[in-house]
Amino acid sequence: MESREKTGEKRGDFIDSLLQIKNSEQNPVYKFEGDNLLYQSGTFFSGFESSSTCTSFTLMELAKHQVYQDLARKDINNAIEKHGWTYEAFKEMKYLEQTILESLRLHPPVSTIDRYTRQNYKIPDTDIVIEKGTPIYISLYGLGTDPRFWDKPEIFNPDRFAEGNHIPDAYMTFGIGPRMCVGK
């Protein structure tokens, strides 16, 4: 970024946008620079990578399962016929959403969620205590394919996410709580 700023080279990309925001900043209290600029870049690239991974796996599953591909295509076409290429059309594509959620269950773009315990926690019916500050790693793939939570977990089935079906708390592809993915 520093060399782009020095040379003035313009590529019409994300870095140009960040530099434009930084250089047009009018608020003296909040400066868009240094670590803040770095964090925003990290957010962008994290979202890009996980979105492209999700898209790739969803397309792979649709290629393998013609019946679901046909249902998703019909869902998309019906919504576009009704609303055109609008946000309302996208919000109405429920089967497409189910397909994406099922793809994320089987192929989470992030393998684990990590957290630290905020207080001591005694595991029920055991003598085990997890001490405050202990790192906890949760396998998203493990949760998404655990037969205790999912019927035939190895099978791709977007109907699991149909309206009215119970979604287990084990579905944490976007995380959970106040640190949930902003991309959800």
Image (tube, grey):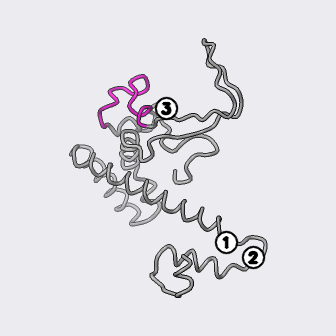
Secondary structure under badge 3? Answer: loop
Dot placed on the residue nearer the N-terminal end, 1 or 2: 2
| Magenta span dominant secondary structure | loop
Q: Quadrant of residue 103?
A: top left
| Residue at the outermost bottom position | 8
Q: Position of residue 63 (x, y in %)?
A: 22, 49
Residue 2: % across, % down: 56, 78
Mark 1 or 2, which is nearer the eye? 1
The quadrant of the rendering that contains the N terminus is bottom right
Q: Is the C-beta separation of discs 2 and 3 under 8 Å?
A: no
Local SS, label 2 = loop
N-term-proximal mark, 2 vs 3: 2
- For discs 3 and 1, the disc positioned in front in the rendered view: 1
- What residue would you read off at disc 2? 27
Q: Nearer the viewer, residue 3 or 36?
A: 3
Given residues 174 and 136, the one toward you in this image is: 136
Amino acid under label 1? Phe
What range is drawn magenta here?
A: 141-156
Dot 3 or dot 1, earlier in sequence: 1
Q: Dot 3, how many residues are within 10 Å of its Cα: few (below 14), some (14-19), or many (20+)?
A: some
Residue 78 at x, y percent in the picture: 33, 56
* Residue placed under numbered mark 1 in the picture: 32
What's the amino acid at mark 3? Answer: Ala
Relative image position of residue 68 (x, y in whole percent): 27, 44
Task: Write the residue at 53% across / 81% down.
Answer: 3
